[in-house]
Amino acid sequence: MVTSKFREREVGSSLAHPEALGDSNAPVHGTVIAKAARTAILQGFIGSLLMVAGSVGVGWMATTSGALIRTPIFIMARTSPVGVIVCTVMLCLGALLLLRSWLRIAQRIGGWNPSSRPVLRRALWMWAVPMMFSLPLFSRDAYAYIGQGRLMEQGLNPYTNGISALSNYFSLGPDKLWTEAPTPYGPLWLWIEQGAVWVSAGVPELALIPFRLAALAGVVLLAVYVPRLAALHGVNPERALWLGVLNPVLLINFIASAHNDSLMLGLVVAGLYFASVKRPVLGIVLITASIAIKPITLIALPFAGLLWAGTRAGWGRRMICWAATLGLSLGLLAAAGLVNGLGFGWLGALQTPGAVWIWYAPVGLLAHTAGLVVGLFGGPGVPVTDIIQTAGTAVSALAIVWLAVRTPGRGFGMPAPLDDEPEFNKTVLRRMAWAFAAVVVLAPVIQPWYMVWLLVFFTVTGIADGPQLRTVFYLTAFFTLIALTDQLSVFQWIPIDVVRGVAIAIAVSFIAYLVFFDKKTHVLFRPHRGILKLKLKPKS
C-alpha cells in the first residue's frame, strides 16, 4: 500500500476519482508510471517538433536582414502560399497534440505520488527543449527586446525613447505597435537585453539565444519551486508540477515565444517560497529581481511582508515588516537605477501595455463598445473609453490594498485568526493570487501569458477538482486557440485571411474533438466526471 503523506492528503482532491487512486488501478512504482505515460510523452514531443517545423514558415524573424531569410528552406516555406499553409498546419497540429498530451499524461499516471515526478520532469524536458530551437512563435516581443538592448548600447534612455529612435529600426522585426512606446521593463531586463545585443554583435538571430536561455531559466525555477511551494500548503506537489508547469499555454508562451514573463514568474515564485520558509531577506531579493524584470510583480511585496510578519503578528509588527519589505526592495531598485543611470524611469512606462485593448478582456470590450456607441450619437466617445478603463485600474488597485490589509483568518467561515502557519501562508498567497486576478481581469488587454501568472499562483494554493479544474481545461484550450490564430508571420503577398482561416479551422475542429468526441479526453470537460481509470493488465 502506498503511504505517501501527499497521496493520503490528496485522495479527495486529486485529479482522479477516489476509486481510481486505489492500489489496484493507479501505478505506484516509477517504472510502471513511466511505461504508462510513455505514449503521452512521445505524443507531446512530436507536437513540439511539429511546432519547430511550422515556425520555419510562420515564425517571426527579422524582416529585411539576417542570413536565415536567404536560406533556401526558409524561402520555400515562407514565399509560397502552399509552403506557408503547410507550415501553419504543422504548427497547429503540433500545439494541439501538446494540449492533448498534457491531458493524457495525467490520465496515464492515474494517481499522484513521488514516483511520478521524474516522469513529469522527463515530459517537461522533452516538450520544452525542441521549442528552444524554433523561431519566435505567436509574438515578436523578442525583437522588441533586441531593439531596447540597442537603445541601451547606444546610450539612449529606453524609458523616454521608443525603438523608432534607432536608425533602420524596422529591420529588427519588432511589432509596429511598440516602436514608438517606451520600455515597460525593469533595469535587470534592460541589462539582459543589452548583454544579448553585445554578445551577438547585433545579429538578430544570435541575439535571440540569450532570451531563450532566460526563458528556460524561468521554467526551471518554476519546475523547482512550484512543487515545493505547493507542498508547504498541503497541495500535492506532483499534481502542481503537472497543472502549473507542464501546461501547454505556459510552454508555448514562455519557451516558444521567449517572453520575459518566464523569468519574472520563476523569480517571484522562488522568492515567495523563501519568504514562506522564514528566509524573508532572500525572498524579497528574489521578488525584487522579478520586479526588475517586469514591475507587475510589485503586487507580491505586501504579501511577502505578511509572510515575514507571521501568523500572530499584530498591526505594529505588520507595519514594520511591510516597511522593511518596501525599504529593502526599493533600495535594491534604487541601486540598480543608480548603476544604469536611469533611476526609476520604469515607473512612467508602466501604462505602456494599457495603450491597447483586446476583445475578450471584459473591461476593454466594455470601454471601447461604450465609447463607440457614445461616439455614434455624437458624444465624447474617447473620454468615455478612458474613464471606464481608468475605473477598472482604480478598482484593481483598491482590490490589491483590501486583500493585503485584510486580516488573514477573519472572514466568512473563519471568525478567528489562523494559528496554523501553513494555513496562514496559504491564505496569504491565495489572496495574492486574487490580487493578480483583479489586475488581469480589470485590465483592457489580457494576453495569454497573463493566464499563466494566475494558473501558477492558484496552483500552489490548490485548484480543486470539479468546476475549478474544468475552468483550467477550458481556459487552456481557449488560450491555445488564441495563440494559434492571432499572430502568424506571413509576407504581405500571402493571403493572410486564408492562412488564418486554415489555422482557425484546424484549431476549432481539434479542440471540439477533444471536448466532445475523443473517447479519452472528453470526460475531462464534463461535470461530475474525472480521469479515466488506468487498468493494468495482470502479469501472466
Image (tube, rainbow, N blue to C red):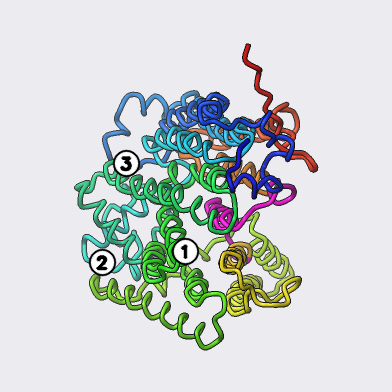
Residue 325 in the image: state x and y as whole percent. Answer: 42, 77
- The answer to which of marks 2 and 3 sits earlier in the sequence is 3
Residue 502 in sight here: no
Mark 2: secondary structure? loop
Q: Is residue 78 left or right of residue 374?
A: left
Q: Nearer the viewer, mark 2 or mark 3?
A: 2
Extent of the magenta region: 442-469
Q: Which mark is residue 3?
A: none
Q: Dot 3: few (<14), some (14–19), or many (≥20) neighbours within 10 Å?
A: few
Decide: is 307 above or below 317: above
Q: Which residue is mark 1?
A: 272
Q: Identify residue type, mark 2.
A: Leu
Tell me the quarter of the picture where residue 76 sits: top left
Q: Which residue is mark 3?
A: 64
Q: Which part of the image, by quadrant, shows the N terminus?
A: top right
Residue 78 in the image: state x and y as whole percent. Answer: 42, 30
Q: Identify residue type, mark 1.
A: Leu
Q: Nearer the viewer, mark 1 or mark 3?
A: 1
Q: Which part of the image, by quadrant, shows the C terminus?
A: top right
